[in-house]
Image (cartoon, grey):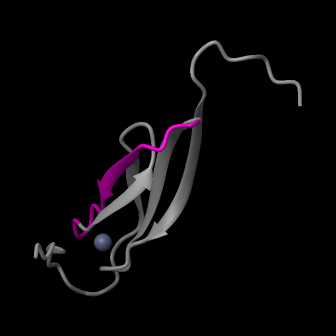
């Protein structure tokens, strides 16, 4: 590979499709990862509010590919015990 050297810390952009385990929506999640960083950020499903964690250097961007398919309109609620 002949990539020019990066003077800045290398951010690696990637995206993946996340099916929401609560409401069934399909989310496109875009993250920037910093090489060597083990940082985690939370994002939530825009359809139901369920939280997910992802390894990322910055706040992930989330967009809805397919809306929820569980036929409900409730919000996911964390059970804090
Ligand atoms: Zn959801």
Number of labels in the image equals: 0
Q: Residue furthest right?
A: 1
Q: Residue furthest top?
A: 7
Whether residue 55 is situated above or below residue 80 in the rendered picture: above
Tell me the residue at 13%/76% (across/down): 79
Q: Position of residue 60 (x, y in %)?
A: 39, 46
In the rendered image, residue 37 lying in the magenta stretch gets the answer: yes
Q: Residue furthest bottom?
A: 71
Q: Is residue 9 left or right of residue 76?
A: right
Q: Position of residue 64 (x, y in %)?
A: 39, 61
Whether residue 54 is situated above or below residue 5 in the rendered picture: below
Whether residue 71 is situated above or below residue 67 in the rendered picture: below
Q: Position of residue 9 (x, y in %)?
A: 57, 22
Q: Quadrant of residue 24?
A: bottom left
Q: Is residue 24 left or right of residue 8?
A: left
Q: Is residue 17 left or right of residue 69?
A: right
- For the stretch drawn in magenta, the main secondary structure is loop
Q: Quadrant of the C terminus?
A: bottom left
Q: Position of residue 51 (x, y in %)?
A: 27, 63
Tell me the residue at 25%/68% (across/down): 50
Q: Is residue 34 left or right of residue 77?
A: right
Tell me the residue at 34%/83% (across/down): 69
In the rendered image, residue 7 lying in the magenta stretch gets the answer: no
Quarter containing ligand 1? bottom left
Tell me the residue at 44%/37% (across/down): 57
**Of 40 and 66, the residue lying toward us:** 40
Q: Quadrant of the N terminus?
A: top right
Residue range highlighted in magenta: 36-49
């Amino acid at each position: 590979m002949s990539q020019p050297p990066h003077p800045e810390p290398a951010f690696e952009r990637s995206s993946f499709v996340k099916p929401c385990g609560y409401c069934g929506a399909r989310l496109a999640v875009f993250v920037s990862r910093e090489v060597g960083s083990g940082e985690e950020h939370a994002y939530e499903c825009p359809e139901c509010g369920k939280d997910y964690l992802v390894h990322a250097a910055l706040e992930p961007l989330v967009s809805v590919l397919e809306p929820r398919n569980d036929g409900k309109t409730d919000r996911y609620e964390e059970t804090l015990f």
